[in-house]
Amino acid sequence: MTDADDTVEVWVDRTDALPVVHRPVIEVDDVWKTYRTGTLEVDALRGVSFAIERGEYVAVMGPSGSGKSTLMHILGCLDVPTSGRFLLAGDDVGGMTEEDLAHARNRRIGFVFQQFNLLASLSAWRNVELPLLYAGVDRPERRRRAVVALERVGLGDRIQHRPGELSGGQQQRVAVARALVTDPDLILADEPTGNLDSVSAHDVLGLLDEVHRSGRTVVLITHDADVAARSGRVMRIRDGQIGDATPVGAGAAGADVP
Ligand code: ADP
């Protein structure tokens, strides 16, 4: 897949009044990212183009140094391309101010990290409500939505527990609840099982399968082929370039979920 324009499908729903146009959640077109350190330049991404449709489950796989983190930072609106375009649900991220980027991160993307990134002093529901706090949602509504999200990940009976009182797998479930609580366009998971034993890893991957089956768009970054095999499509990155995408496991079935 070399040209996003060739692969992007835009479809139209007819409502009573106006047609609603659905864009892919992610459109990346000829993105380059160059890091400059003194006189040294490193092209971490070299002309990357792809699209991810709503409801897809895509794994980005590649060896260390291939550009996975750089791509994750761009898809997560944590950084912007040096050149090329990245559209998030149809909006051009390149034209966004720092404030717009923070807003996009908060409202439109749910992050799941290898290290969980939970605040140790806060209970599970307090951790899960944080994105809603930043979004200005009032406290009763924050608590209600945090509890619903924790119930969805099977932790309805652990809402008052702090991270230190939960297993690694449960902590990652809390992180998934936090990622879901804002009802984002995209769940971005960076090596989500990298810190877990095999049983907990299996458990968290099962949860991501459920998240995907419920119609969410999931992008998972991993170096682990077994983890990638859970997705519907594997995009391989090497030396800052994307190779051919390979359709794989059960995740492919959700690719047409609107
Ligand atoms: P991966 O996540 O696949 O290990 P990265 O995206 O971290 O790969 O790195 C891709 C390339 O960009 C590597 O050659 C790395 O050394 C370089 N790189 C990453 N971040 C920086 C940075 N902040 N400054 C300079 N070079 C960087």
Image (cartoon, rainbow, N blue to C red):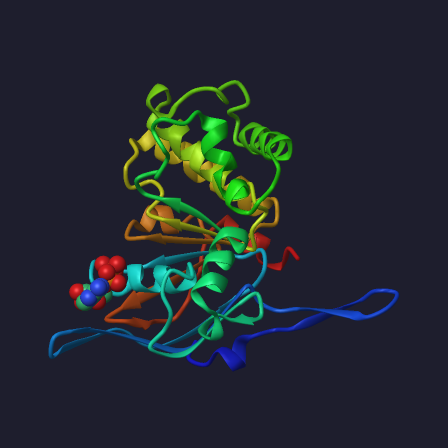
On the question of residue 57 being in view, the answer is no
- 191 lies above or below 82: above
Which of the two residues, 74 or 258, is positioned nearer the viewer here? 74
Q: Residue at 49%, 43% (x, y): give it.
A: 179
User: In the rendered image, which quarter is residue 115 located in?
Assistant: top left
Residue 33 drawn at (x, y percent): 30, 74
Which of the two residues, 118 or 1, is positioned nearer the viewer here? 118
* Residue 210 horizontal side relative to residue 201, left or right: right
Q: Residue at 56%, 55% (x, y): give it.
A: 185
* Residue 8 horizontal side relative to residue 161, left or right: right
- 8 lies above or below 54: below
Q: Residue furthest left?
A: 39
Which of the two residues, 255 or 165, is positioned nearer the viewer here? 165
Residue 116 drawn at (x, y percent): 35, 38
User: In the rendered image, which quarter is residue 16 located in?
Assistant: bottom right
Residue 231 drawn at (x, y percent): 45, 52
Q: Residue at 57%, 53% (x, y): give it.
A: 253
Q: Residue at 43%, 39% (x, y): give it.
A: 205
Looking at the image, in which quadrant does ligand 1 appear? Answer: bottom left
- 192 lies above or below 66: above
Residue 24 drawn at (x, y percent): 57, 67
